[in-house]
Amino acid sequence: MELIKNKVAESGIITLDLASYMLKEGQIATFDIKPFLFREMILREKDYRASLQTFDWQVFRNKYVAIFCSADAIVPVWAYMLAATYLEPVAQAVYFGTEAEMQKFFLLSNIEKIDKTEFEDKRVVIKGCGDTAIPDAAYVAITQHLKPVVKSLMYGEPCSTVPVYKKPATKPAG
């Protein structure tokens, strides 16, 4: 009786799931300035300041907070700055932009922090399918980050990959 071999497991391929470098759902919160606008159009400084003073900032405790305005209104820069001063003592981090933009920013930052030495001369597959949507920019960033050190870089799943990069074979000296 012949044993069935798992060639994928024996191949030494490392699968890298970019979703593991993203902020988790419970870590993220948003602060939309729209509800603080008069008629969702105009920011009145006195009213805005008063509203911020009475707002319960504890809902943002230890969260990554994206500050933005969903209304089509002209919001002065200082309004975002003022909100950030209230968020800074309670939030894990504060970011200007939408939740998606913040997620992308932190994902790209986390990719830059990946220790390349773990992947030196390894065959690496960047996971391509999953439950979490990964920004395209992350795939470009991980390619640039790992290409200098990996033996090969692929996209997809270990059983079905698309080759992206293969280190050229070095000729023996002599």
Image: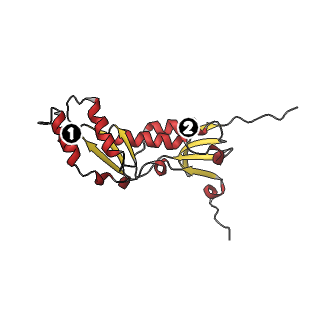
Q: Amino acid at mark 1?
A: Arg
Q: Quadrant of the N terminus?
A: bottom right
- The residue closer to the viewer here, 67 or 170, is 67
Mark 1 → mark 2, Cα distance in angstroms: 45 Å
Q: Amino acid at mark 2?
A: Thr
Instruction: Give the residue drawn at x 48%, y 40%.
Output: 108
Label 2: state its secondary structure: helix
Q: Which residue matches tag 2? A: 143
- The residue closer to the viewer here, 31 or 137, is 31
Label 1: state its secondary structure: helix
Instruction: Give the residue drawn at x 66%, y 39%.
Output: 149
Q: Residue furthest left?
A: 39
Mark 1 or 2, which is nearer the eye?
A: 1
Mark 1 vs 2, N-terminal side = 1
Colour mode of the rendering: secondary structure
How many marks overall?
A: 2
Q: Which residue matches tag 1? A: 49
Instruction: Give the residue drawn at x 36%, y 55%.
Output: 26
- The residue closer to the viewer here, 80 or 171, is 80
Left or right side of 63 for 39: left
Q: Horizontal and vertical percent for residue 143?
A: 55, 37
Instruction: Give the residue drawn at x 22%, y 49%.
Output: 55
Q: Horizontal and vertical percent for residue 162?
A: 55, 42
Q: Quadrant of the C terminus?
A: top right
- The residue closer to the viewer here, 58 or 16, is 58
Neighbourhood count class around disc 2 (C-alpha, 10 Å): few under 14, some 14–19, many 20 upward: some
Q: Residue furthest right?
A: 174
Quarter where residue 151 is shown: top right
Left or right side of 41 for 121: right
Q: Horizontal and vertical percent for residue 14?
A: 60, 51
